[in-house]
Image (cartoon, helix red, strand yellow):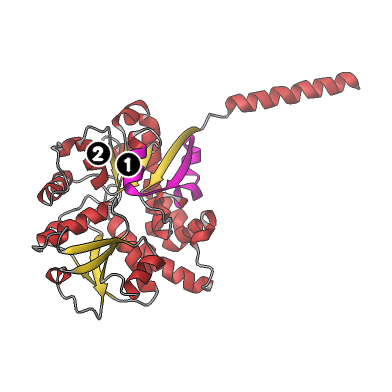
Amino acid sequence: MNKTRRTLSAFATLLATAAATAAPAQEKITFALGTTVIDASQANNTSVPQHLNCWEDAGLDVEIQPSRSSAAVQALVTGGVDFVLAGPAASIVAASKGADVQAVYLNIRKNFVFLTVPEDSDIQSLEDFKGKNVGVYSYGAQQYRVFRGMVAEAGLDPDEDVTWLETGAGAQAVAALESDRVDAWGTWDSQLATAENMGLKFRRFTTPEAEKLNWGSSVFTTKAYADEHKEAVGDFLRCIAEGTAFTIANPEAAIRAHWEIYPESKPSNLSDEEAMAQALNIVNTRMEFVDPGPDGVFGLMPEGSAAATVKFMRDNDILEDDVDPETLFTNEFVEATNDFDRKAIEERAKSE
């Protein structure tokens, strides 16, 4: 009996050792978001790749960290994180000062930030912003730089003619507007949809130059990291593309997946039907800016996009140092990013 037990014990140990040897080590990846709000608009980049087990199946252990654009880019430059999802302005400024940072995936492919006022406001044009208080998410955010450029394009001095106030996001930003602490609100697509869900109506302002900015939020890494981890970069980005294809095909399923992984993002004061309706408004609004179309290519940076953004930043005194636009991004990983069966992902999404 003792011999049998010893034999079984040895066999069990052998199996455990073999299993441990066979299981591939997960490569740790830290992914910082340029926002502290992981609402349903972030589902395609965060929860849906996890729902699909895409990163895990690729051998990647991804940790997602909410942050702010400037802080996230600083963490990337100093080696604190491996990838950042944010607007390009902070990264362009960092690159112009010699930092090793480069976009590897285009997420939002057209201008998605606007200066807004309540529908009943007496502000009718950007020229009317003179002497007004404008709420913005953060002074370090990409959009703040775009808003300054918008008022400058309208002939105003962004430092002398407008007072900018940090009002954060979500309910606190709306409260600042409703309490007349600010006269206008500089915000982005999904936040505007969130406010509209609260029954508010807005008038949007943009400018011709701002509308040329088709380099929206992107995934950034360092050239050094990309050179050393090419396969991991391709797999990481492919999973974001799969998550996006899934979300476009069935936004309701994407929202349910998001609530499962981030339960705090589901409103607790609404019925399931009301919560879903509001989340759908947010996600559908975001997908308008993300969807490359049925025959489009995920992650591809169009020719001239970086140059247009750099020009906008220079024209509006946002960028002080010279930088070659062609060094700010790479399409090297586009093939790996799109190396999946989009129809299969869409069919799975529609079945859930």
Q: Is residue 250 visible?
A: no
Q: CA distance from mark 1 to mark 2?
A: 8 Å
Label 2: few (<14), some (14–19) or many (≥20) C-alpha neighbours in 10 Å: many
Q: Position of residue 55 (x, y in %)?
A: 46, 41
Q: N-terminal of the two: label 1 or label 2?
A: 1
Q: Position of residue 105 (x, y in %)?
A: 30, 43
Between residue 106 and residue 343, name the one nearer to us: 106
Between residue 1 and residue 148, name the one nearer to us: 148
Between residue 30 and residue 68, name the one nearer to us: 68
Q: Check residue 59 for magenta coloring.
A: yes
Q: Position of residue 9 (x, y in %)?
A: 79, 24
Q: Is residue 92 left or right of residue 86?
A: left
- Give the residue type at disc 2: Ala
| Residue at position x 34%, y 69% in the image | 176
Q: Which residue is mark 2?
A: 94
Q: Check residue 170 for magenta coloring.
A: no
- Give the residue type at disc 1: Val
Q: Is residue 22 left or right of residue 148?
A: right
Contact between labelled residues 2 and 1, with CB atoms less than 8 Å apart: yes
Q: Position of residue 251 (x, y in %)?
A: 42, 61
Q: Which residue is mark 1?
A: 73
Q: Is residue 320 left or right of residue 85?
A: left
Task: State the extent of the magenta-drawn residues as a range.
Answer: 48-75
| Residue at position x 91%, y 22% in the image | 1
| Residue at position x 28%, y 58% in the image | 289
Check disc 2 and report its element: helix, strand or loop: helix
Q: Residue furthest bottom?
A: 120
Q: Is residue 167 visible?
A: yes
